[in-house]
Image (cartoon, rainbow, N blue to C red):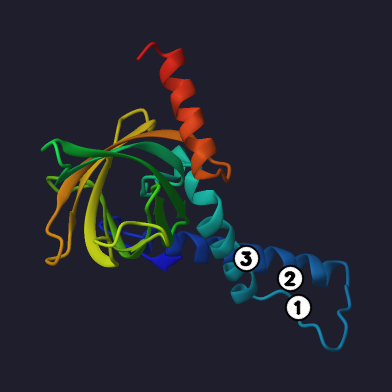
Amino acid sequence: MHTYATDIDRGRVTIILAIVAIALTFGVNALVQKWNIQFLWWLDSPSVMLFFGILYKLYDSYLWRLHIRFLDLPTIPDFSGVWAGVLTSSWKDQAGNQTKIDIVFYIKQTWTEISIRTETKTSTSYTTMAAIYTRSYEPGLRYEYISNPEVFAIETMHAHPGTGHLQMSPDGKALTGDYYTGRDRVTLGNFVLTFISKEKLSREEALKRLASQQMNSGR
């Protein structure tokens, strides 16, 4: 995983975590003195940095997703999960039709880090950098990636860089977006993705679940 930029101010959260860490340190040390607790010679009493480190790790990994309303903390959209759908490319087949490819996105995300890996039948890509915007004229997840062809892909396919942009639906169940490849390929296209699961799934299983969801919804 790698860090990602955002227009959300993370500083306020850090200040709140520091205040809570100070309060916890004061409370614990007060109890230590009251009950006359003796620590081992190699173990110091709980410190502010210890509590801050624990709180920061918990918030970075889990608590940021809770959206605690009464604290009015800044909210970063959660893109994590397995998403499956169709990539429509400007690359045309021999009949002159646009290419449509089944694709699966695997997105891992914490409060500060993210990774996006995509799989098709012929290639795998992974991100090198990303940013999440909420207040721009085109909010969403922007990223740069490197795509690598599978061993048995056609000879014209080769590793190449690209950029992408994803936007989440209001209910958090769909992603739409577009991509653009490097200058040597100069192709572009769009994605239509459906949320499948928070669990780890193979590409085949994710596509099976997508087909099942579409059948149940009558599409």
Q: Which residue is mark 1?
A: 45
Q: Secondary structure at mark 3?
A: helix
Rendering quarter of residue 39: bottom right
Q: Which mark is residue 138?
A: none
As measured in the structure, the alpha-carbon distance from the residue carrying label 1 to the one carrying label 2 is 7 Å
Kind of residue at badge 2: Asn
Assess disc 1: are there few (<14), some (14-19) or many (≥20) residues with their C-alpha within 10 Å of its C-alpha.
few
Image point (41%, 59%), residue name = 150
Q: Which residue is mark 2?
A: 29
Q: Are marks 1 and 2 in contact (CB under 8 Å)?
A: yes
* Nearest-to-viewer mark from 1 and 2: 1
Q: Which residue is mark 3?
A: 54
On the image, the x and y values in percent for residue 75 come to 37, 46
Image point (48%, 41%), residue name = 68
* Nearest-to-viewer mark from 3 and 1: 3
The one nearer the camera, 178 or 7, is: 178
Q: Is residue 123 left or right of residue 59?
A: left
* Nearest-to-viewer mark from 3 and 2: 3
Q: Secondary structure at mark 2?
A: helix
Question: Which badge, 3 or 2, comes first in the chain's sequence?
Answer: 2
The one nearer the camera, 88 or 117, is: 88
Image point (79%, 65%), residue name = 31
